[in-house]
Image (cartoon, rainbow, N blue to C red):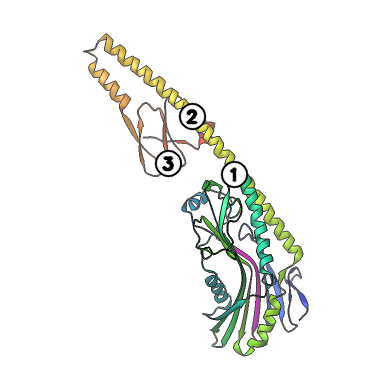
Amino acid sequence: MSELKKLTDQDNYIYALASVPDSYMTGASLVNQIQHETVPFTVTAHAIDSSRNIMIFGLTDEMFTTYVNPMIKMTLKSVPNIIWNSIRDFIEPGVYLKQFAEAISQMALTAVSNTKLPSILGRDPQKSYNDMMAVYNAYFQRETSLGTPTFANNSIFLPLLVKYKGISKSGVPCVVLAGMDYKGCEYYSNVSALSAISPIGGLLGSLFKTNQQEAGSARFGHGKPCDAIDWGAANKFALICPEEYEQEATKDFIEFVSTFRMDPNLRQQFDQKVIERSNMMANQAMQYQAMAQQSRINLQRSQQQLQQTLAQNSADMSNMIMDSWNQKMASDSRISQARSEAVMGVNTYQNSYGQNYQVDVVADHVYENQHGEVYGVSGSAPDQSVLNDLNWKEIDK
């Protein structure tokens, strides 16, 4: 086996380690941008033998979340700090890997065969699966403490290597090997979608009910019930070479794959950033719960005040009608009828969504909440602080 090399950028900052023959020029870079709740940054590395046009690539950590429940999709629009580029429609693992292979090789490819990826994680898939589960279980325990128990249908860890063939732009027949440490989890919850402020930190809770590798459940990505799916790869690899160098290039590629890993110091920073992001989202979830509870309390108080005001106004109006009726029934019949119509009448108001609502004419003020629901208030207008807490705004006829 070749010497384990430090894969660095032009400033000699170490990003990854791998065994690479001396004939290859190596390099690495850091994509310092959060890609997913569990991926604060990504490392890419390469090894290139220009004399034989052999290229080897290694990429760390890519994850996506697919929201199946439409209510969660609607809720996400009002939640801050959402990583929108991590939200993507689910695709089958084979399609995901082929898309990666064609994108990095810039060729249309045809799959020829597949086998198990001999990566560090792939050599002991049960340990890799257990490590993944440990991370999920930590989130489950936290979310359960926040009152959002959630259940998982399927989970998966799949080290996969596929051989493709294609023709380069210059017309050279090529072999492309693409592999990944694929992983994922399906989950669902019966609690409010308001909790879904992060893919695995806000919707999840409780423990897995089944394991895709152990239980005969539905194919991963197709379980029911299901609110959301996390899926992606811990690592992705690619080899691109002319067919004539397939044998020796494959040997070099397998050596690279079987030793490739992120620099340990950098991985420690990676894990710390994941924890920090998780804690931030947990605090945000608690703030949302507190705000929701206070809004419910304020709404109940406002409704009680509104009912009291309407009851008093109704009593006062009834007394006025009765007084007029008793004093001069005949001459005041038309006035009495007009007052009665006012009591039973309505005014029409339109909310910001273009919907019409009929509100009792006794309402001195009419308000709309963030959902477009309309409420009439008689008497003095609620304090601005109350309106802010309720997220109400006044509307005109």
- Residue ID for mark 2: 302
Q: Answer with mark 2 or mark 1, whichever residue precedes in sequence.
A: 1
**Residue kind at label 3, given as amino acid type:** Gly
Nearer to me, 133 or 192: 133
Q: Residue furthest left?
A: 330
Q: Secondary structure at mark 2?
A: helix
Give the residue type at disc 1: Gly
Work out whether mark 3 precedes mark 2 in sequence or the reverse, and give the earlier one.
2
Q: Residue at x 48, y 54 (%)?
A: 69
Neighbour tally class for label 2: few under 14, some 14-19, many 20 plus, Cα within 10 Å: some
- Front of the two marks 2 and 1: 1
Q: Quadrant of the C terminus?
A: top left
Decide which of 118, 34 is in the foreground and name it. 118
Residue 16 placement (x, y as % from top left): 73, 70
Please determine whether, in this image, residue 290 is positioned above or below residue 380.
below
Within-10-Å neighbours for mark 1: few <14, some 14–19, many 20+: few
Q: Nearer the viewer, mark 3 or mark 1?
A: 1
Counting from the top left corner in percent of width and height, residue 177 is at 60, 79
Q: Report x, y in % for residue 193.
A: 52, 48
The answer to whether residue 50 is visible is no
- Tell me which residue sits at (48%, 29%) in the image: 302
Residue at image mark 3:
372
| Marks 2 and 1 in Cβ contact (< 8 Å) | no
Amino acid type for the residue under numbered disc 2: Ser
Establish if 354 lies above or below 10. above
